[in-house]
Amino acid sequence: MSGGFADLLRELKRRESGKLAAKLPSWADFELEVPESLNFQQCSSEITARYKASLAGSGLRVADLTGGLGADSWAFSLCSSAVWYNERVASLCSAVRRNFTALGVRNVVFNNFDISPAAHDWVESLKAFGPDLVYLDPARRDSGGKKLFLLEDCSPDVLSLMPVLLEIAERVMVKVSPMADLTMLQRRLSGALDSLHIVGAEGECKEIVCCCSRHPSVDPAIVLFENDRTLSASAGATSPAPRIIGEMGAGEVAPADADVSLFVPSAAMIKSGMGPGICLCAYNEELSHFGKFYKVIENLPFSSSEIKTLGRRYPHAEVTARGVQITSEDLRRRLGVKPGDPVHIFACSLASQRRIIVCTRHQGNL
């Protein structure tokens, strides 16, 4: 029994190490401590951490008030002169200190304060450090595990702390839920917000970063970052505009050499409000960083008769429903198809009409 239990522990450790390596590839070759699985689940990925570090700039002093497993502090340490890391859970703080030693990080000061408007010890320590930028990632679940979306409900309360933080540092960066409403963020952070950054990876909206300043822009920019590309909705900026193609006739099959694609924006692009929605257009390389292109085989009306026959023509296909009153799973059942490449069947709304678009993946996709 003991051998079996030891094997189980080794297997669990191997799986956790694999997940950590996928999320933070630069940490993959090191023996690191992860006290609890929740610490790993809540930490930033390497892609998002490095992006935030790029926003911070180089050679500055950065304070991370909610350090956690340390992914963000590690990324900041790569470009900053010094980092003030803080974690209120003492055991996690100690584990991160040992991990950073293993990773060769030498410019981080470790702290174990409970960040709250009522406490003052952390404020004095932060002032003594003299940060140029303060970063925090408030906990977005209550004591019962329920998700929180309003800034003032998260811990620590960013809105209460913002005046104090901007007295100490020129800039404050706040990571919030990818589900947060952009209008709500602009309203709650009015007078301090300089820009909003929607960060996407692997087709998902991973996080939203609010950059605040003592001297914010009158018109805060909205920036989309995905696949090492950025789009900005600031004044004068333009989004890549696809060449929209007119609807093919109902039931018409696209010629083999036709340059007709279905563009499906990523979750991050949808969240940003930039670029087109799902549309028929010519392939656009710049847009391919913010969504997927599919080569159109058939463009059909959304009808019961088409659905009945479609499954027989394409018995194996991926299925997606977007913007129509049916779920992807319900559509799959009605079609009677089994998962399988390369065909992808979309039910969507185009030019205010419900359509069924049969596609294959475009070779230009990333």
Image (cartoon, rainbow, N blue to C red):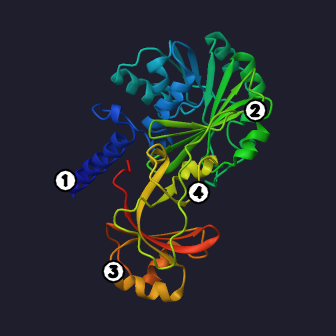
Q: Which mark is residue 277?
A: 4
Which secondary structure, mark 3? loop
Marks 1,4: beta carbons within 8 A: no
The residue carrying mark 3 is 315
Which secondary structure, mark 1? helix
For the residues labelled 4 and 3, the Cα–Cα distance comes to 28 Å
Precedes in sequence: disc 4 or disc 3: 4
Inspect this view and state whether residue 18 appears.
yes
Precedes in sequence: disc 2 or disc 3: 2
The image shows a total of numbered marks equal to 4
For the residues labelled 1 and 2, the Cα–Cα distance comes to 63 Å
The crowding category of the residue bearing disc 4, from other C-alpha atoms within 10 Å (few below 14, some 14 to 19, many at least 20), is some
Mark 4 or 2, which is nearer the eye? 4
The residue carrying mark 1 is 3
Mark 4 or 3, which is nearer the eye? 4
State the residue at coordinates (74%, 28%): 162
Precedes in sequence: disc 3 or disc 1: 1
Precedes in sequence: disc 4 or disc 2: 2
State the residue at coordinates (48%, 33%): 49
The residue carrying mark 2 is 219
The amino acid type of the residue labelled 3 equals Pro
Extreme residue toward the left, this view = 3
State the residue at coordinates (36%, 50%): 364
For the residues labelled 2 and 3, the Cα–Cα distance comes to 51 Å
Q: Quadrant of the N terminus?
A: bottom left
Q: Position of residue 345 (x, y in %)?
A: 43, 71
Inspect this view and state whether residue 70 appears.
no
The amino acid type of the residue labelled 2 equals Asp
Precedes in sequence: disc 1 or disc 2: 1
For the residues labelled 1 and 4, the Cα–Cα distance comes to 55 Å
